[in-house]
Amino acid sequence: MEFLAQYGLFLAQAVTIVIAILVVAGGVVAIGQRQKQERDGHIEIRHLNERYRQMGEAIRRAVLDKSALKAEGKARKKADKARAKEQKKAAKSGAGEKEADHKPRLYTLVFDGDLKASATDHLREEISVVLSQAGEGDEVLVKLESPGGLVHGYGLAASQLQRIVDAGVTLTVAVDKVAASGGYMMACVANRIIAAPFAVIGSIGVLAQLPNFHRLLKKHDIDFELLTAGEYKRTLTLFGENTDKGREKFLEELETTHTLFKDFVGRHRPSLDIARVATGEVWYGQNALDENLVDELQTSDAFIQSRIADWEIYEVRYVARKHWQEKLGIAAEGAVERSLLRLWQRSRGPHF
């Protein structure tokens, strides 16, 4: 009888443990699913024509007297009525809505690049949506800002822009501040590059740097072991003793990457003297225009303003939901990257 009692107690404890494990596992899965759902983003579309129209009306209400405002309103209604009449007439004649009313569309995207080109995930979604809707005569404007970063990250970002060109949609990249290194790798894919007069352009080069703590560890009698299979699995390390052979191999890899970079830019900008501009130097807007690194000096705002009367302009953004932990991490990462960018700018010479 005592044995049965002990067995029953053991069984109850085992069942309790199993249930507790299942509850914890279920909770973890539920949290993971909830976080996954919360991370799912959505596309936001803003009609810039309407935005500018509303701002213009606000200004007119502030600066015009009542009689002038009333007269303007009557004139606008008359013009709208005439336009509606023409559209109706065109529809009856068989011209159809597309010819009577359709304006070409300009889709504007924003790429704010960090060291890892993290915005590529959003860019991918935005381009997929735009390409599903872009018609004949429509164009895409990408407002690009990036000092460059990881090779593979910016290589993928450039490939995303290539999708637009491959689809036969005209792509313009606008550089208001900086498109250097990986940023320029992205920009050169475009059919046309415009830049502000003092935008930083170029830096067609490759760099890598890392500290080495080997002597510090040796001074304190600390051994470090790095085991590899493959002669060049690791060339330079943070804690091991680096060799001349390793440095030579590392430099060889940098040169290979630089050659790929130059070939990529040369294919997309055949008018460039690639040997002259692929030195890692940067140029400000006017000098970049002289070197054929860009096609025109113009800000993104001026480009949009020049199209506002005759084009339908839409700003497309992919917005992802983030947890407070992610937001805190992004804020810290942003502070570090801003510090690195300031150091990079100082290292490049004169700055404002």
Image: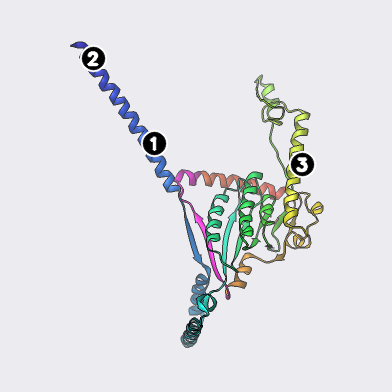
Q: Quadrant of residue 229?
A: top right
Q: Residues within 10 Å of mark 2 (few under 14, many from 20)?
A: few
Magenta residues, as a range? Answer: 309-328
Q: Is 122 left, or right, of 290 in this rendering?
A: left
Quadrant of the rendering where the N terminus is positioned: top left
State the residue lying farthest toward the front: 94
Give the mark nearest the N terminus, 1 or 2.
2
Calculate the distance from the C-alpha at mark 3 to the C-alpha at mark 1.
47 Å
**SS category of the residue bearing label 3:** helix
Which element is circle 2 on?
helix
Question: What's the mark number on residue 209?
Answer: none
Q: Which residue is mark 2?
A: 6
The percent position of residue 270, horizontal first and vertical second, equals: 77, 58
Tell me the amino acid under the disc marked 2: Gln
Q: Label 1 near label 3: C-beta < 8 Å? A: no
Q: Earlier in the sequence, mark 2 or mark 3?
A: 2
The residue that mark 3 highlights is 255
Q: Which residue is mark 1?
A: 28
Q: Residue at x 55, y 60 (%)?
A: 131
User: x and y percent of residue 261 in the render?
Assistant: 73, 48
Q: In the picture shown, does residue 300 fall above or below 320?
A: below
Residue 290: x and y, percent? 78, 62
Q: Position of residue 250 (x, y in %)?
A: 74, 35
Q: Quadrant of residue 212?
A: top right
Q: Is residue 181 above or below residue 18?
A: below
Q: Are marks 1 and 2 in contact (CB under 8 Å)?
A: no
